[in-house]
Image (cartoon, rainbow, N blue to C red):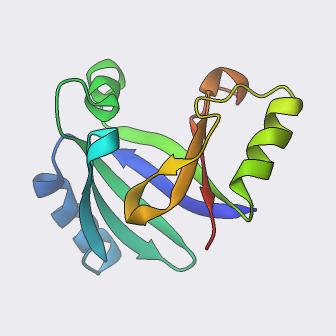
Amino acid sequence: MRIHHLGLAVESLASSVPIFEKLLGTAPESDEDVADQKVRVAVFRLGESRLELLEGTGKDSPITRFISKRGQGIHHLALAVPDLEEALRKLERDGLRLIDREPREGAGKERIAFLHPASTAGVLIELVEEA
């Protein structure tokens, strides 16, 4: 297992992307809408990991709700796993609470699933299946 990415909730990609371009010295490698999750994502590559800037695309977006409650900042930690279904079965057997019992499609068409922060020390964890 390794850190796949860190998800950062931002109010606006238009104002946040230039900040991270200056900080990281590079432009995002991709920018896409993930309609199912009501989010727009700008991805910066950092070695083997990435930073994903996340902007909600509506009032009912999880990112928009997160920002209204907690403000901009770290939203989730994503961990890469080789077999997502097996990881979900094992973690549920071990007593962790799953948000997603079945994988779904995330940014970059990757297979993902989330674990509930109530069972992970208050941190929203995303699992990403490595290709």
Whole-percent x, y for residue 113 in the image: 58, 44
What residue sits 49% from the left and 54% below the top? 6
Decide: is 41 above or below 113: below
Residue placed farthest to the left in the image? 14
User: Dividing the image into 4 quarters, which one contains the N terminus?
Assistant: bottom right
What residue sits 27% from the left and 39% below the top? 38
Whole-percent x, y for residue 43 in the image: 34, 66
Decide: is 40 above or below 26: above
Q: Which quadrant would residue 120 be assigned to in this image?
A: top right
Q: Nearer the viewer, residue 65 or 114?
A: 114
What residue sits 18% from the left and 25% below the top? 59
User: Dividing the image into 4 quarters, which one contains the C terminus?
Assistant: bottom right
Instruction: Tally the numbered discs.
Output: 0
Whole-percent x, y for residue 87 in the image: 78, 49
Whole-percent x, y for residue 84 in the image: 70, 54
Is residue 91 found left or right of 30 in the rendered image? right
Q: Nearer the viewer, residue 103 or 74?
A: 103
Decide: is 57 above or below 42: above
Q: Which quadrant would residue 72 be assigned to in this image?
A: top left
Is residue 117 found left or right of 19 in the rendered image? right
What residue sits 58% from the left and 46% below the top? 103
